[in-house]
Image: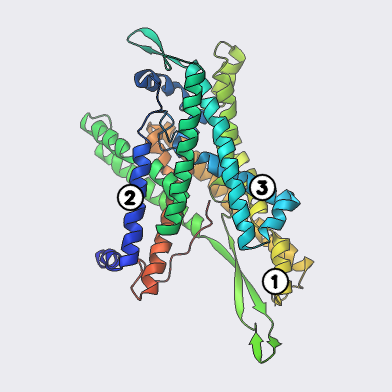
Amino acid sequence: MIDRIRNIFNIPELRKRILFTIGVLIVVRVGAHIPVPGIDGKALGAAIQNYQNTLFGLYDLFAGGAFRKATLFALGIMPYISASIIIQLMGAVVPYFQRLQKEGEEGRKKINQLTRYGTVLISALQSYSVGVFLESMTATVNGAAVPVVPHPGFLFKFTVIISLVTGTMLMMWLGERITERGIGNGISLIIMIGILSRLPNVVVSEITLIREGVRGLLGEVVLLGIMFIIVAFVVLLTQGTRKIPVQYAKRVVGRKVYGGQSTHIPLRVNTAGVMPIIFAQSIMFIPSTIAMFFSDSEFMAGVMRWFSYDHPFYWFIFGIIIIFFTYFYTAIAFDPTQVSTTMKQQGGFIPGVRPGKRTAEYIDNILTRVTLPGSFFLAFIAIFPYILMNAMDIGYDLASFFGGTSLLIIVGVALDTLQQIESHLLMRHYDGFLSKGKIRGRRRM
């Protein structure tokens, strides 16, 4: 492994790409600590503790902790992801976007342009909401109620909108620069680094608990063992593929012979990636987010108890929604009919299956069966951190590394980055990170 790491820095181009990526990620982390003007930092830190298990807590996860500090990168890259998801969903139902998806490079450029416009619009709306939300927040500091925004008004809202929209566009631009000049998918790397930024605090907290005798060394060893097993299963889930054999008939065009080779269609166990958990979390946080604004209502207090992350009802509904969204997003991301039509046009066929409608039904049937265990395991991975919090009495920051959105993103992006480095090494006749075969990639977010 040491020799292979040394090989990375022996390649000038790869070395420049890695150093460039590290430099950009440092800029991202610096921006996550520059606060928006006009905010009382102590009051904000005291007030934001009540919002960790709401939609704001989920948003803070993707912003790498910048949302709770109301920094320039408080919105993170989420407006860009939201715009991308909307464009992708519209591509499944709107004919205009369907035509763009079939126009090749020009269509992709147009889609990217529309995604950027959507990012600006979404970030502007969200930044205005953040400004209004910050003005409504108060905190108790030294026994006195202190507003988070000492001087609310139009000027403050305008400052927040300009600062957060600019920060979001800068993060989007930095992510694109990493994709072009760095290693891997820049947007995913920015999200992963934001999640990993919480790891040092978690490690320090665990060391403090051991020194104070709250948790024993054996308990930490057990936690490490559980983490190793969960990570191994998440890697299997991310890499798991069902291959459908495809044969292409020979075609003679002039003096050249085309086709005749055998290949396969890879159907992933987890085609939807991390998106079902993100959608499900967004829905599950809605009741608690609404109840937060009706603190005096007994009915909403009961809703808060039922939708608390330590309640079995929450786990059950959460798992059901994840399974539903896994099939929903898989149907959007992979179209058996389109695959069947493309194969037929290129002279391809699945041995023993008639081309056309029968091939589409065959692929759809296999995809449905392959997705079933993947959806159940995805639901288990999402719920496991909450079960662990109840069983071993650990904090959410630590438990989030044992499953859920955080672990899936970290594993997926890490595998994607290793694949990028592996391809550079193999192109220059160096050994890759694995002695047996290449690292298979994953679907990007």
Assign a secondary structure to mark 1: helix
- Is residue 198 in sight in this rendering? no
Count of number-bearing discs: 3
Among numbered discs 2 and 3, the one appearing first in the sequence: 2
Q: CA distance from mark 1 to mark 3?
A: 24 Å
Amino acid of disc 1: Met
Report the mark closest to the observer, 2 or 1.
2
Where is residue 45, by image quadrant? top left
Binning the other alpha carbons within 10 Å of mark 3 as few (below 14), some (14 to 19) or many (20 upward) gives some
Residue 441, given in percent of the width and then of the height, sits at: 48, 61
Residue 127, given in percent of the width and then of the height, sits at: 52, 29
* Residue under pointer 3: 89
Amino acid of disc 2: Gly
Name the mark on residue 23: 2
Q: CA distance from mark 2 to mark 1?
A: 44 Å
* Residue under pointer 1: 343
Instruction: Name the one closer to the observer, 193 or 10.
Output: 10
Assign a secondary structure to mark 2: helix
Among numbered discs 2 and 1, the one appearing first in the sequence: 2
Binning the other alpha carbons within 10 Å of mark 1 as few (below 14), some (14 to 19) or many (20 upward) gives some
- The residue most toward the left is 211
- Is residue 40 in sight in this rendering? yes
61 relative to 369, above or below = above
In-image side of 335 versus 76 (left or right): right
Q: Residue at x 64, y 47 (%)?
A: 87
Report the mark closest to the observer, 1 or 3.
3
Quarter occupied by the N terminus: bottom left
Residue 329, given in percent of the width and then of the height, sits at: 63, 49
Report the mark closest to the observer, 2 or 3.
2
Q: Residue at x 50, y 56 (%)?
A: 238
Assign a secondary structure to mark 3: helix
